C-alpha cells in the first residue's frame, strides 16, 4: 500500500511560527512533525510515500533529501551517532512530491495524489498530526481494511466542548472497536454530547477521488475530505489505541514536546524543571 502525507496547508493557527516555515517542519522535541508521520508509515510497512506540498514548503523536500556537506562535516568530526540519524532520514522510504497549487482544502490536496495512487487503496497521514502508539496507527487501520476492504478512519472520543475543532462521526458498532460510520460532519458547531472525532489517519479506497470531485466547497469555503468520505457507501472506523497530537494547535505541540522529551535522557532534568512551577 502507498501513503499520502498532505502538507500543503497554510497553518494559520500556528502563526507567526508558520509565516515562512511549514507547520509540518516545526520540531516536536528534536524532530520535525512530518518525520513522525513518515516513520509511522514506514513502521506500518509502507515504503512508497507521496507528500503533497505547496509554495514555501521546500524545506520538507530538503529534509528528506541527502545532505552531502552536512554528512561530510559530521564524518570528519567523528560524530557517528548523529551522522547515522541524518542518513536514516534519507533512507526511510521512496518519497515523491506533488504540489497543490491553491490551498483550497484537504480534499483537494488528496485529489492531487490520484495519478500517483491509481486505483489502489492508500493510507493518508496528516503531516501536522503525530500518532503515538505501540502498534502504529496506520497499521491498525490497514489490518481492519484487510478484513473489510472498505475505507477505514481512525477515531478518538472527545468531549462536546472540543467538537468544533474536529471532524466528528456518528457510528454504530459492528464488532469489538470497529464501527460502521453513518454520518460525518466537519467541525460541527452545535452538537451536544461526547462523540467520536477523526484524528488524521485514514485508509481510503480509490473511489474517494470521484467523491472529492463531486464535493462542493464546505466549511471555510474549502473542499473538505470529511465531506467526500461521507459520500462513500461504506466506511468503518476504529478508536485509535494510542495518543494523537494535532500540532495545528499550539497546546498539543507543547504537550507533545514534553511527552517526547520525557522519553529521553533529559527526563529527570525536565521533571525537576517542571516541579519548580508547582506550589
Ligand atoms: P488543516 O486543516 O490543519 O489546515 O490541515 P491548515 O491550512 O494546514 O492549517 P490552519 O487551519 O490554517 O491552521 C490538515 C492537514 O492537511 C494539509 C495541511 O498541511 C495539514 O497537514 N492541507 C490542508 C493541505 O495539504 N492542503 C490544504 O489546502 C489544506
Image: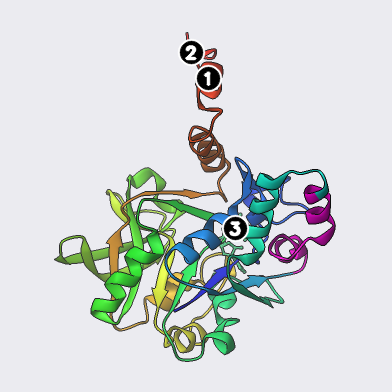
Q: Residue furthest top?
A: 279
Name the residue at 45% across, 85% down. 211
Q: Are marks 1 and 2 in contact (CB under 8 Å)?
A: yes
Q: Which residue is mark 3?
A: 34
| Disc assigned to residue 278 | 2
| Disc assigned to residue 274 | 1
Up the image or down, 137 lies above or below 100; here it is above
Magenta span contains residue 8: no
The secondary structure type at the circle numbered 2 is loop
Q: Considering depth in this image, is 111 or 185 the residue closer to the camera?
A: 111
The secondary structure type at the circle numbered 3 is helix
Ligand 1 falls in which quarter? Answer: bottom right
Magenta span contains residue 65: yes
* Label 3 to label 1: alpha-carbon separation: 27 Å
Q: Is residue 61 visible?
A: yes
Position of residue 272 measured from the top left corner of the image (x, y, whole percent): 52, 16
**In this rendering, position of residue 276 left or right of residue 143:** right
| Disc assigned to residue 53 | none
Callout 1 crowding tier (Cα within 10 Å): few <14, some 14–19, many ≥20? few
Q: Is residue 7 visible?
A: no
Name the residue at 56% across, 28% down. 266
- Magenta region, residue range: 55-75
Amino acid at each position: 500500500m502507498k501513503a499520502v502525507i498532505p502538507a500543503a496547508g497554510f497553518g494559520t493557527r500556528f502563526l507567526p511560527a508558520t509565516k515562512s516555515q511549514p507547520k509540518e517542519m516545526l520540531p516536536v522535541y528534536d524532530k520535525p512533525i512530518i518525520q513522525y508521520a513518515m516513520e509511522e508509515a514506514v513502521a506500518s510497512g509502507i515504503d512508497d510515500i507521496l507528500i503533497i506540498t505547496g509554495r514555501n514548503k521546500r524545506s520538507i523536500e530538503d529534509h528528506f533529501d541527502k545532505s552531502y556537506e552536512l554528512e561530510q562535516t559530521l564524518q570528519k568530526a567523528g560524530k557517528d551517532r548523529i551522522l547515522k540519524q541524518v542518513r536514516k532520514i534519507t533512507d526511510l522510504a521512496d518519497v515523491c512530491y506533488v504540489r497543490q497549487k491553491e490551498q483550497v482544502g484537504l480534499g483537494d490536496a488528496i485529489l492531487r495524489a490520484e495519478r500517483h495512487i491509481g486505483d489502489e487503496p492508500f493510507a493518508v497521514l496528516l503531516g501536522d498530526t503525530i500518532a503515538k502508539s505501540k502498534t502504529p496507527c496506520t497499521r491498525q487501520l490497514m489490518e481492519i481494511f484487510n478484513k473489510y476492504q472498505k475505507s477505514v478512519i481512525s477515531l478518538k472520543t472527545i468531549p462536546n466542548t472540543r467538537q468544533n475543532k474536529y471532524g466528528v462521526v456518528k457510528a454504530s458498532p459492528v464488532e469489538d472497536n470497529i464501527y460502521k460510520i453513518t454520518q460525518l460532519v466537519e467541525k460541527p458547531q452545535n452538537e451536544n454530547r461526547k462523540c467520536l472525532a477523526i484524528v488524521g489517519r485514514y485508509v481510503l479506497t480509490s473511489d474517494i477521488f470521484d467523491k472529492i470531485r463531486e464535493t462542493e466547497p464546505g466549511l471555510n469555503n474549502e473542499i473538505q475530505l470529511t465531506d467526500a468520505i461521507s459520500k462513500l457507501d461504506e466506511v468503518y472506523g476504529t478508536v485509535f489505541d494510542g495518543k494523537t497530537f494535532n500540532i495545528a494547535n499550539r497546546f498539543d505541540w507543547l504537550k507533545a514536546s514534553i511527552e517526547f522529551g520525557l522519553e529521553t535522557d533529559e527526563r529527570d532534568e525536565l521533571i525537576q524543571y517542571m516541579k519548580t512551577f508547582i506550589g
